[in-house]
Image (cartoon, rainbow, N blue to C red):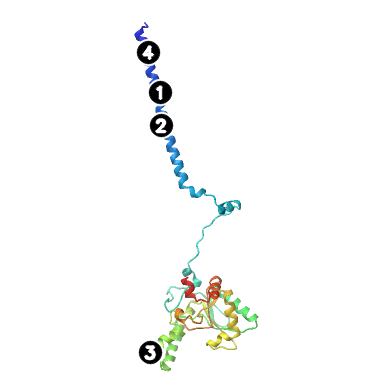
Amino acid sequence: MYTSENGYKIRKEKERGNEIKKLRKSKLKKCIGVLGILIALIIITGCVNNFGKFVITKNNVRAANKNEKTIETTKPSKKSDWKLILVNYQNKINSDTKIDVVQLKNGQAIDKRCYEELQQMMDDCRDEGLDPIICSSYRSHRKQKILYEQKIYDLLNEGYSQTKAKNEAATVVAIPGTSEHEIGLAVDIVDDNYQMLENEQENTPVQKWLMKNCWKYGFILRYPENKKKITGVIYEPWHYRYVGKTAAKEIMSKGICLEEYLDE
């Protein structure tokens, strides 16, 4: 039986139900709002972190238009390049250094990796009507020791003391273990018409041509004039060392020695 009391209860229950629905909707809206803010923050953070990737510059636009690929490369260290190995009175040859030489026609030998350039240099020199001769090239450690001790002996006979003889000999014949000849990258070249290892060798047609053109084949005049304090070796206008075409061009054009080039 329906009474006013029952109607009042029903009405109250409906009102309460409506309030609950409104409260749920309000909570849902708040949740959606908070979730939206979180998503927005995540997106903004990602954009900030990756902003650099989307910066447009002339370079990357040009690369994109040409469908170019950017490849990062690193230049090899000078001191890790086999062509630029430094051997002098302060830098001895490592005991584990491997020497793979090829024999030349006159019984000399050189590291096979620079054989073609050496052969081309000699051929081109001869094509100019000149007569270059390789009088010394690769030497074993034993042979270097014999040459060094012989030089000391000669100086002792000239009146030098033991200490002075050793010091002076080292400026002419490298101490065993410190000679470029032992690594197969050095050659002594003279003019057939003047085969003396003296300063006058620089005036021969062969040396004039070599000093002007050796860099084209990757060789340098290893012991230039006025560089003794740096190299520890006297001026030798006959001693050429392979360093590769890039280094040779820079060294010869600047008038520096290998030590100075490696220190740059």
- Of discs 3 and 4, which sits in the foreground? 4
- Cα–Cα span, label 2 and label 3: 96 Å
The answer to whether residue 208 of the structure is visible from this angle is: yes
Q: Secondary structure at mark 2?
A: helix
Tell me which label, 2 or 4, sits earlier in the chain.
4
Tell me which label, 1 or 4, sits earlier in the chain.
4
Tell me which label, 2 or 1, sits earlier in the chain.
1
In this picture, residue 101 sits left or right of residue 163: right
- Cα–Cα span, label 2 and label 4: 31 Å
Amino acid type, mark 3: Gln
The label on residue 10 is: 4
Q: Secondary structure at mark 3?
A: helix
- Cα–Cα span, label 1 and label 3: 110 Å
- Of discs 1 and 3, which sits in the foreground? 1
Give x and y (percent) for residue 5.
Answer: 34, 9
In the orientation shown, which residue stands out farthest toward the left?
5
The label on residue 162 is: 3
Residue at position x 49%, y 75% in the image: 258
Classed neighbour count for the residue bearing mark 3: other residues with Cα under 10 Å, few (<14), some (14–19), many (≥20) = few
Tell me which label, 1 or 3, sits earlier in the chain.
1
From the image, tell me which residue sits under label 1.
Answer: 22
Tell me which label, 2 or 3, sits earlier in the chain.
2
From the image, tell me which residue sits under label 2.
Answer: 31
